[in-house]
Amino acid sequence: MNLGYWRTSTTEQSEERQVISLKEAGCEERFIFGDKITGTSNYGDRPELSKCLLMLREGDTLIIHELDRLGRSMVEMLVQVNNLIERGVHIKTLDGRLSTKDMPEELVKLIVGVMGYAAEMELKNIKKRTAEGRAVALNKGVKFGRKRAYTQGQEAQVIDLRTEGNGYGSIATSMGMSVGKVRRILANNGVS
């Protein structure tokens, strides 16, 4: 039996391309599982992957688009692949890089190790490029995070009310804000 697994990193990404490929590779829709979660997440955080792995039996084939659908950490990938091989489960990637059905176990482990290493290095490079891009943006004055939900006038009024001795709750009520927002405004301006 063929079981398929897809993964997308964010809720904005569509799994449609992967699902279509899995169906074309011989997976019935009821045997296709998928999670919308980052590649760096723990296996325990992927409920659909867990279901898929539990359902696999000796002689079955796990079909995935690329090996990094199982994770980007070389160690995690190797452990998972070794567990599947020991259970007699075959692994096939739709990118054509791996099909364990006709390969010696030693060669499979070598290929998985190299592919896992490459995926892990790519993730590190992505993180590095993201950090570099963020640093450049910060130097240009770009502000990150959620935009303020209050004006500078409201901020000044909150500070004035607090310096007059009003409590957080009464300030929040009079300003139509949450107590947490009042506390943040005051903390950001060094007022307690």
Image (cartoon, rainbow, N blue to C red):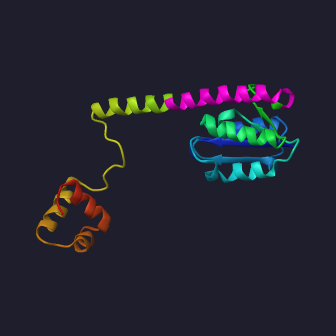
Residue 99 in view here: no
Up-down: is 39 above or below 136? Answer: below
Residue 101 sits in quarter: top right
Please tell me which residue lies in front, 115 or 141: 115
Residue interval drawn in magenta: 101-124
Residue 63: image x %, image y %? 78, 37
How many numbered badges does the structure rendering display?
Answer: 0
Who's the residue at 60% across and 26% down the image? 118
The percent position of residue 146, horizontal first and vertical second, equals 36, 49
* Main SS class of the magenta portion in the image: helix
In this view, the residue farthest toward the left is 164
- In the figure, 18 relative to 181: above or below? above
Where does the image place residue 86, in percent across and percent down from the top left?
80, 41
Residue 58 falls in image quadrant: top right
Is residue 171 highlighted in magenta?
no
Along the line of sight, the residue nearer the viewer: 24 or 153 = 24
Going by the image, does 2 lie left or right of 11?
right
Image quarter hosting the N terminus:
top right
User: What residue sits 74% from the left and 53% below the top?
Assistant: 51
**Quadrant showing the C terminus:** bottom left
Q: Is residue 79 above or below residue 53?
A: above
Tell me: residue 90, above or below residue 185.
above
120 within the magenta span: yes
Residue 189 in the figure: left or right of residue 107? left
* Relative image position of residue 98 (x, y in whole percent): 76, 28
Left or right: where 79 falls relative to 155: right
Q: Nearer the viewer, residue 185 or 110?
A: 110
